[in-house]
Image: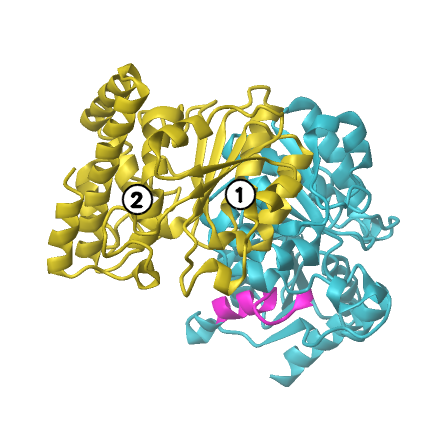
Amino acid sequence: MSTLLDTAPVDNRVAFAEELIELASHDDRIVAVCNDSVGSSNLVAFRERFPDRLVNVGIAEQNMVGVGAGLAAVGLIPFVCAAGPFLTGRALEQIKADVAYSQQNVILCGMSPGMAYGELGPTHHSVEDFSWLRALPGLDIVVPADAAQTRIALRQAVAEPRPTYIRIGRHKVPPVSPETNVLERGRFALAREGSDATIIAAGTEVSKALEAAEILAGRGVSVRVLNAVYIAPLDQQAIAAAARDTRAIVTAEEANVAGGLGAAVAAVVAELPKSQRVPMRILGLRDFAPTGSTDFLLDHFGLNAAGLVRAVEEVLNGD
Amino acid sequence: MLLESTEQVSRWHERRAAFAELDPSMRAEALQRQANSIRRDIVRMISAAGQGHIGGDFSVTDVLTVLFNVVLDVDPHEPRRDGRDIFILSKGHCAAALYATLASAGFFSPNELATFMKPLSDLNGHPANTKVPGVETSTGPLGHGLPVAVGAALGSRIKGAPARVVVVTGDGEMQEGSNWEALMSASHLGLDNLTLFIDRNRLQQGARTEETNALDPLDEKLAAFGLEVRVIDGHDFRQLEAAFGPSTTGKPVAIVANTIKGKGVSFIEDRVEWHHKVPSTEQVEMALEELAQ
């Protein structure tokens, strides 16, 4: 575990771009669609290799998602790529009606999600995506925590195409999973076993959770870490098991807490039999972010190892 | 998902073949009779449901009749057949007109029309592609059909076999910005296999379009966006048929069809309150009588 975390952190968009080209070279149904984001979505090499399968609609996100749905309607597999906030915010009704409700197999790629655009401010942060998209039935929400999971998520999207939103991280993260790992649809990935408390973390927060677990182990506290690589469908079994096997659950997400991962977990815990319910702490954003780099903001909101250690100790001792 | 009606599909094939044999003026008369038969279905559906959008249904009935009996290469027996023409009704609130048209082609049994908007019916107030064969994408919120049509037109071209894609929008719907985003793409991409048909009935839910947020000169706007524009009488069957001829300029085609909301029933025609008013029992009789031919 610690050897993985010691590896140099990387930008998941690199793995995304390489894997998409690899997949497209074997499958001519794959098309990339973007909104003037050829560069920021890392699609330059894709465009050079497959100029006829790169559709840049310009700065027009509603049209971009609608075009994606139309491409899917005639049997193609569109990867619709745009910075998370503009994809999910501006085109939310297209995601609802044209993709989720119409069950078109569009792969929505929310690039540079969370607070990856740190100093550019809340207009450019994608921290509402979980809340908005969780309310849409029939749409998978996938949050790869590292480069290897990003590659696997893309391969699965092509192997079994279905309406899907994938967060493609820009903020560099260390590997948290072996390259050979498989993702099971609707299941969290076990990142570390533990018996006192469980941290359920998504994306950038998985490596922070593993760091926190290591610190807590040194203090005699055993922490299970679940990588919430699927937020929808939600792994209700793993949540119930965490409540049964450990004494508390802490969630961590680079997202607003209103309706996000923590809220989803809490809704499951709240409906467990009384004897199985456990206290929780939900870490995430409760306000628009102030000015600062991504690292500064993660620290500011306590979305770091220290914040997670504090939350676990509080919830184990306080409740 | 509803199932095809094989009996009705056979009837539809016979009807199409018969229409194809007729000379243009005779075909126009036959199409007129077919359209009024669809309008009678619509009257009964809306009366039974106690809800619906009769005005807009009637203004698009003629074009739907031409599309499904003459123009489109679709297959009620295999609605998702690869290479089919794609039809999208972007003004999803006119679902009754679409359902009656699809049922008459056998995409599902005409008996289903009686369930329109009833509890748990597949025939929702707005069409859902997961429930109704022949519906390509679920519509309802306005400004969605044209971007999807652009994607379908482009996608079939990428696949190497450009299919014809036809999308019908309302005119009030052209106030939605997403349509103009899509028009820019259609033009930029040179999608000459795409036809946008605008049902220019000049009324929207609350008032006349020109009193609400004026669209004119709509033809000039569309031309400025790079479309080949055809302005027609949307209730003249010969003009309707001709308007769906292929692009002559390599540009996508926009048909601005001047229509009458409520077309076919005198007391409904061109009256804003009939956007979604429901006819009384007496009005149903009067409407069916006017639509008898």
Q: Name the residue under label 2.
A: B97
Q: In this view, does A165 lie to the left or right of B268?
A: right
Q: Residue furthest bottom?
A: A318
The amino acid beneath tag 1 is Leu
| Picture quadrant of residue B24 | top left
Asked whether disc 1 touches disc 2, contact meaning CB atoms under 8 Å apart, the reply is no
**Whole-number angstrom distance, CA of label 1 to CA of label 2:** 19 Å
Q: Position of residue B146 (x, y in %)?
A: 53, 43
Figure colour of chain A: cyan
Q: Name the residue under label 1.
A: B146
The residue nearer to you, when weighing B25 against A162, is B25
The residue nearer to you, when weighing A233 against B23, is B23
Q: Which mark is residue B211?
A: none
The amino acid beneath tag 2 is Ala
The structure residue drawn at horizontal position 20% and vertical position 24%, both measured from the top left corner, is B11
- Tell me if residue A234 comes above or below residue A302 in the rendering: above
Q: Position of residue B276 (x, y in %)?
A: 31, 60
Magenta segment boundaries in residue numbering: A252-269
Question: Chain letter for yellow?
Answer: B
